[in-house]
Each structure stands twice: as structure tokens, then as C-alpha cells.
Amino acid sequence: MVKAGIIGLGGMGTGHLNNLIRFSKEGDVIKLIAACDIRPEAFEKKEQEFNIDLGESDDSYKDYQCYTDYEEMIEKEELDMVIIALPTYLHKEATIKCLEKGLNVLCEKPMGLNVQECEEMLAKSKEVGKRLMIGQVLRFWGSYEELKKAVDSKIYGEATSAAFFRGGALPAWGYEGWYYKRECGGGAMHDQHVHDVDMVQYLFGMPKAVSSVGKIIMPGSGHDSVSTNYIYDDYKVVNTQDDWMLQDDSFHMNFRVNFETATMWLRDDGLFICEKGGTPHPMECDTENAYYKEVKYLAQLIENPEMENTINPPEDSLNTVRLVCAEEDSADNHGRITEIR
């Protein structure tokens, strides 16, 4: 059984904590040993202030240690892995310290704010021989799993065009407003848009260039709304859009991917497929909590050292940050075509 700790109990961390509690009660994969947050009051809060369901709230399991200093936690406790759910600007430092202590790490997305940070994290993981995985959770999300199967299998032929949208209200749950500071979170492009950017390269590989337009609504926050076109050698049409300034409390993540003989949609009311000449009908997909699935996958990797991480390797997460940084450069320059380096 993998012994786990968690660092950071904000919106995302609280969801991860609830899933770790679930694992502990199930008793066969992961046991929660310790949790850490700089705010003592965080240990009494089980409900998440977040825009999507991360896991069911559960305060019936109390058999874990609580810390307000994560360096003390990783020094005192015997752990196999940690989940790092800290603000983005702290990802590199905390990840490297945990890896140096001999711990496997699941770090929340994005991997870092720039390519250099990500390269340092990846290099440390390889140096110490411990697993590093980034929380690019769409790779474990049922509807996106079905899309990946369709793209890879070519059951409907080649994908010819794709559009992804993600949007919601401005995140109000960040510690000391870190979401609103470009140097801390990178704005919507790095924090929220990164999910669809990761899915684009997971499905279609790295594009050769991008062109992005963005709107900065809150001074100092980074781009709060963005639209990106991805340039591929085969000229497939791929676009992502993100906006975290929607004027209600709703959250939306949608896609439309067109194949040679079918079109697949993820809408607010579910996943649909329409084959050529037919009518759209719902598709079945796995409904298990994707955050639970990604943590379970890392535990399996830890317990099976020979097992290759074929779903969510950290090298992919580095490339996702590489893409986001190229998009940011393009948006800062009014849509200039930016090559991926």
C-alpha cells in the first residue's frame, strides 16, 4: 500500500484530500498519512469552493497527522508519495524538495510557469529515480478518454478539425489572491486554459506554431480570455478558447471534434456522436472521478517500477507548458505566429 501525504488544502487540495480519505477507507491502494496547509483552519474545512466536482466531502476519517510546514511533514513522516496542490509559483520548489526526500510526486497543473522550471523538476525526478506526474486530469476524464480512443483508433477516420472551450467565473478561492497575479499563477492561460492545451497535444501531437489573441481584463492578472489556433503540417483546423470572466457561477468545458465519417461533441448535457448520415446520440463513458483515477494510476506506477507511464508522462506536461508560453508570447504580440521551440 502506498503511504501518501498532501501539501495544500485550498480548493483543489480539499478535493484531493477527500479522495485520499476515500482511498484510506477502501484500504487496498493508498493510505493517507499526513496533510499540510499553512492555515490551521484549513483542516476543519471539508467542502470545496471550486467550479467542478473534485470528490465527495468526507470528514469521518481522522487518522492522519496535520502540519502547517510541509518540510517538517516530509521530514517526520514515512511517505511514499505526496500530492502538491500549492499555488503555481510554489510548484517547482516544493516538488524538488519532495523528490530530494525520496518521495514520488503528483504536482497539480500547470507543471510550472515557464519551461526552465519544468526542466528542473523533470531533471530532479530522473536524478533521484522517483516518479513525477502532473495533474493534467483530462487524460483520465471519461469523455476525453473516449475522444482519445476515437482519434488513436481512427474508427471514424482522421480527425480533420477540433474546437475546445473552457470557461467560468473568476476563481475567488485562491490564497491571498494569487490567481490574479501573473507572476504567481499566469492568469487564465496557465491555470485553466492549460487543460485544453494539454489535450490538443495529447490528441494530435505538438503543433509547429501557434497564433493566440488574448484580453487582459484585470490589470496584472495575465490574459483572462484567450483564443488560439494551432498550426499543423497537415493543416487540420484546431482551436481552443478559454474565458474565466463569465458573468455567472456556471462552469463549462466543451469540445467538438470532426472526423472523416463522424462528429463528436462534449456538451453541457453530455457526450454525443453523430456518424455520417445519422443523427446525434449520447455516448457512454466512464463516470468515475477523474482525480481519483489519476492518483490511483500514480500509485500503480509506484508499486510497479517497471511499468511505463504511457498516459501522463511529465515530459508531456513540460511540452504543454512550452505551448502555453508560446501562446502567451503570441497573445502579448497581438496574435503573432509563434513557432514552438
Image: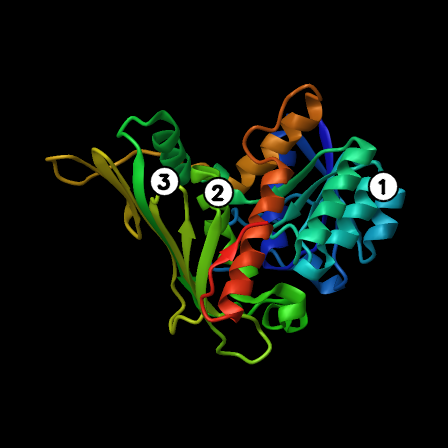
Residue at the image point whose x is 66% and y is 43% from the top:
61
Circle 1 is placed at which residue position?
A: 100
- CA gap, disc 3 to disc 2? 14 Å
Q: Are marks 1 and 3 in contact (CB under 8 Å)?
A: no
Towards the viewer: 27 or 207: 207
Task: Note whether residue 13 is visible.
Answer: yes
Q: Indicate the position of residue 8 as horizontal and vertical percent values.
A: 70, 55
Snapshot quadrant of residue 245: bottom left
Q: Earlier in the sequence, mark 2 or mark 1?
A: 1
Q: Earlier in the sequence, mark 3 or mark 2?
A: 2
Snapshot quadrant of residue 24: top right
Q: Residues within 10 Å of mark 3 (few under 14, many from 20)?
A: few
Snapshot quadrant of residue 128: top right
The furthest residue to the bottom = 219
Q: Indicate the position of residue 130 as horizontal and vertical percent values.
A: 76, 33
> Which scheme is used to colour this image of the protein?
rainbow
Task: Note whether residue 286 is visible.
Answer: no
Circle 3 is placed at which residue position?
A: 234
- CA gap, disc 1 to disc 3? 43 Å
Q: Indicate the position of residue 46 as horizontal and vertical percent values.
A: 60, 55
Q: Are marks 2 and 1 in contact (CB under 8 Å)?
A: no
* Amino acid, disc 1: Glu
Residue 201's mark? 2
Element at badge 3? loop
Q: Earlier in the sequence, mark 1 or mark 3?
A: 1
Residue at the image point whose x is 72% and y is 30% from the top:
2
